[in-house]
Image: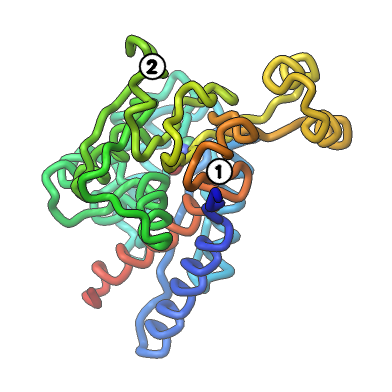
Amino acid sequence: MTTILDGHAIAATMRAEVKEAVDAMIANGARPPSLTAVLVGDNPASSTYVASKTKACKNAGLIGETLRLPADVSHETLDRHLRALAANDEVDGILVQLPLPDHLPTRTVLETVPPEKDVDGFHAESVGRLWLGEPGLTPATPTGVIELLKRYDIALSGAHAVIVGRSDIVGKPMAALLLRENCTVTICHSRTRDLPAMCRQADLLVAAIGRPAMIGPEHVREGAVVVDVGINRITDAATVEKLYPGNEKRRRGFDKRGSTLTGDVDYERVAPLASAITPVPRGVGPLTVAQLLVNTLTASKRRQGLA
Ligand code: GUN
């Protein structure tokens, strides 16, 4: 029997726990935690993500604001806004939604967020603290994955975790967090030789590549735990048929909505092999938002001297 790791349900529990903690803070006379998301330009996916983050803040009793700036904003202007947010004592968390337009220096921009307000954990100091095992804020997506695995009592200590993807947002911090849990960690990427054989060594396989349905049954040892971080929207029928030949359910969903959402894992063919697996949607996606609230709560408590 395969366990479906219900990220949607775990995220709902995490959000309820945050709300309870925020209510208690307010009852004790503290400020509610406050997050400002900075959104540059009008990338539809980024706009959707930021809207869901600020809505989740409000539902959990946090203050969630969005600072919208035009796609052609100068680095100087963005920098001025970020410094004002950094100096504003009532802002606990600052999040710069990525990707930024090409003319902006992403790394330099991320270093402008003070580490104590860095709820994404993207500042170089936050990254350093993560690898050193020092306290600090850690990236929401991989941290949410750890939370999910722990809440399902999945044993991590001594397990061989294979991560496919080496991004700064998921792959690298996922490796650091799993190492912290005493996993043996392998990071694979586009230059890895014989990827299926590498992946078949995994007790825990984390797919964070951004390529729809790339991980198939040939990558998965029977009984492995599979975590799918990918969120890929497919909008053309030919690709659906190529990735999912003869899959009637997929095709009907696509015909109805004009698109289909798929992870990096070929779920239908991999799930029967796995002991546990995250679906897409309702897997890792909701955990990212829930963990961001947890991070903002943590930042706020530390900043208000409550932690
Ligand atoms: N873009 C894709 N994922 C993320 C994330 O976790 N945080 C931010 N700020 N931007 C992203």
Closest to the observer, 223 or 82: 223
- As drawn, the label of residue 195 is 2
**Mark 2 or mark 1, which is nearer to you?**
2
The reply to whether the residue tagged 2 has its Cβ within 8 angstroms of ligand 1 is: no
> Dot 1: few (<14), some (14–19), or many (≥20) neighbours within 10 Å?
few
What is the secondary structure assignment of the residue under circle 2?
Answer: helix
**Would you name the residue on which mark 1 appears?**
68
In this picture, residue 202 sits left or right of residue 280: left
What is the secondary structure assignment of the residue under circle 1?
Answer: strand
Closest to the observer, 160 or 296: 160
Q: Residue, x 22% and y 50% (percent of image)?
A: 157
Q: Residue, x 53% and y 71% (percent of image)?
A: 60
In this picture, residue 128 sits left or right of residue 240: left
Mark 1: amino acid:
Arg
**Residue 146 x/y as whole percent:** 35, 52
Mark 2: amino acid:
Leu
Q: Residue, x 60% and y 60% (percent of image)?
A: 55
Closest to the observer, 32 or 176: 176
Q: Quadrant of residue 297?
A: bottom left
- Precedes in sequence: disc 2 or disc 1: 1
**Residue 180 x/y as whole percent:** 19, 48
**Residue 305 x/y as whole percent:** 21, 75
- As drawn, the label of residue 148 is none
In this rendering, is residue 200 above or below 184?
above
**Residue 31 x/y as whole percent:** 38, 77
The reply to whether the residue tagged 1 has its Cβ within 8 angstroms of ligand 1 is: no
In this rendering, is residue 182 above or below 229?
below
